[in-house]
Amino acid sequence: MNKFAQLDHAHVWHPFTQMRDWLRGEPIVIARGQGAVLRDVKGREYLDANSSIWTNLHGHQHPKINAAITRQLKQIAHSSALGFANEPASLLAEKLVSAADPKSKTATAQLRKVFFSDDGSTALEVALKLAHQYALRTCGKKIRPKILSLDGAYHGDTIGAVSLGHIDLFHKAYGGMLFPTDKVMSPYCYRCPFNRARPERNDARKYRKCHWECVGKVEQKFSAQKKKGNPYAAFVFEPLMQGAAGMIPQPSGWLGQVTEIARHHGALLIADEVMTGFGRTGVTCHVDDRTIADVVKRPASAKLFATARVGIVPDFLCVAKGLTGGYLPMAATLTTQKVFAAFLGEYEEFKTFFHGHSFTGNQLGAAAALASLEILQSAASVRARARLQKQMHEELQSLWALPQVGDIRQVGLVAGIELVKDWRTRQPFALRERAGIRVCEAMAKRGVLTRPVGNVIVLMPPYCTTPAQVHQMISALGAAVKSALKN
Ligand SMILES: Cc1ncc(COP(=O)(O)O)c(C=O)c1O
């Protein structure tokens, strides 16, 4: 076994990993990356089909991001945001608010303030603490601010973020440590009890037969909580697609309806764009050659955030993962002037937001993020993303021929492929059958790396992935399903 693999086995404890299984095999030790390709210490090459757990946007070793980090390194790597400002963090805050809120330059802009932190979980913690304090300060000390999130929600692994989560497998073990939150039905069309449609060879959102009962459930939940005299302080959601819940896409119109209900009931909106941000949900809903040409002519029209794409400006927008192009751990929580104002006062009033991290506003991260934003806003990147979105859609159609493919759900540049025993019955594989893991292992043998969410295979390629590489990813997935799940 390679020396680094031995050291890993001796000392490293991997996240979300059954270490007994891990210690049975020889790990792939990644040594280099270039574009969408990862290379291990033995010189084998793999496609990075989940963008290194949903972080990488433009590929590895992007010359512009490398150069930006190197330039910044010659100035300073890090100084504290406790007491000091710095150039790249100030510039980045301005660029983030203008990307997130199209009105940022006008008096009616909502998102104006940026609190930097380290990762997706901390971005959510910041939003939670701010929303909690804001509710207490504006509604009086009598209320007990309560938060509503979606069934299957995953918002990170710190205690606050876990409290928002509703995936028993991940979250139940921490029961005693968490604060109570409520959950409401999320629109999982493929397995929705209200969807009367029989399975078809199509994305379940397209052939569902229902009366928007899922929206009705949200209304009922808000009304019931209001009747208790303690309306929800905030509603937390991933816009357009819930990631770790199983790549669950929202049917067109759902997000607008439920955020309107939440607003109507006075709840703050916390949008978790840790996965969906920075162009991941695509340049437009549908890409054909004409829309590609249109967006390329006006690259600024390609919205970078899912919320901006559907015209929603939340009270908190949480970003991380792709913020630095997937290079460095950095996160941000964007919020409104209204929330900010609730924390202003004389020193001795102690209205200060008492929260912070040592690396808040880190210069290297901010320099990488600025370079990444510049790439994202270029016509070349918009064109590449539109083409990738279109090609993924076309190639994914080939997978419908496999009886173990129940649903293929694509939102922009993310696709979730749900594996089932037989598409005609939608019968799921039991988790202990490790269907998703087996398929991903078979894909790795074919030179494609990704990680499943239960029985859902995730394809989330870097935006620089070439047509030949997309073809390889999807063919490897088809072949892996055939070999790993043959009866
Ligand atoms: C939607 C969402 N929110 C938050 C997180 C937590 O991010 P991190 O792992 O950077 O703490 C994740 C991680 O996958 C996520 O997908």
Image (cartoon, rainbow, N blue to C red):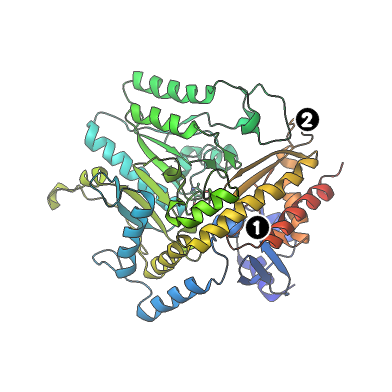
Q: Residues within 10 Å of mark 1 (few under 14, many from 20)?
A: many
Q: Which residue reaches farthest right?
A: 487
Mark 1 → mark 2, Cα distance in angstroms: 28 Å
x, y percent for residue 166 = 52, 36
Q: Is residue 327 left or right of residue 421?
A: left
Q: Nearer the viewer, residue 102 or 316?
A: 102
Q: Amino acid type of disc 2?
A: Arg
1 and 2 marks in contact (CB < 8 Å): no
Q: Nearer the viewer, residue 415 or 179?
A: 415
Q: Secondary structure at mark 2?
A: loop
User: How many marks overall?
Assistant: 2
- The image's mark for residue 65 is none
Mark 2 CB within 8 Å of ligand 1: no
Instruction: Give the residue drawn at x 35%, y 31%.
Output: 263
Q: Earlier in the sequence, mark 1 or mark 2?
A: 1
Mark 1 CB within 8 Å of ligand 1: no
Instruction: State whether residue 172 appears in this view.
Output: yes
Instruction: Give the residue drawn at x 78%, y 60%.
Output: 445
Quarter of the picture containing the C terminus is top right
Q: Amino acid type of disc 1?
A: Ala
Instruction: Give the residue drawn at x 66%, y 73%.
Output: 4
x, y percent for residue 334 = 34, 50
Q: Nearer the viewer, residue 290 or 200?
A: 290
Residue position marked by numbered label 1 in the rendering? 49
Instruction: Give the residue drawn at x 31%, y 59%.
Output: 94
x, y percent for residue 455 = 69, 42
Compared to 485, does 476 lie above or below? Answer: below
Residue position marked by numbered label 2 in the rendering? 424
Q: Secondary structure at mark 1?
A: loop
Q: Nearer the viewer, residue 97 or 178?
A: 97
x, y percent for residue 348 = 13, 50
Q: Is residue 355 left or right of residue 417?
A: left
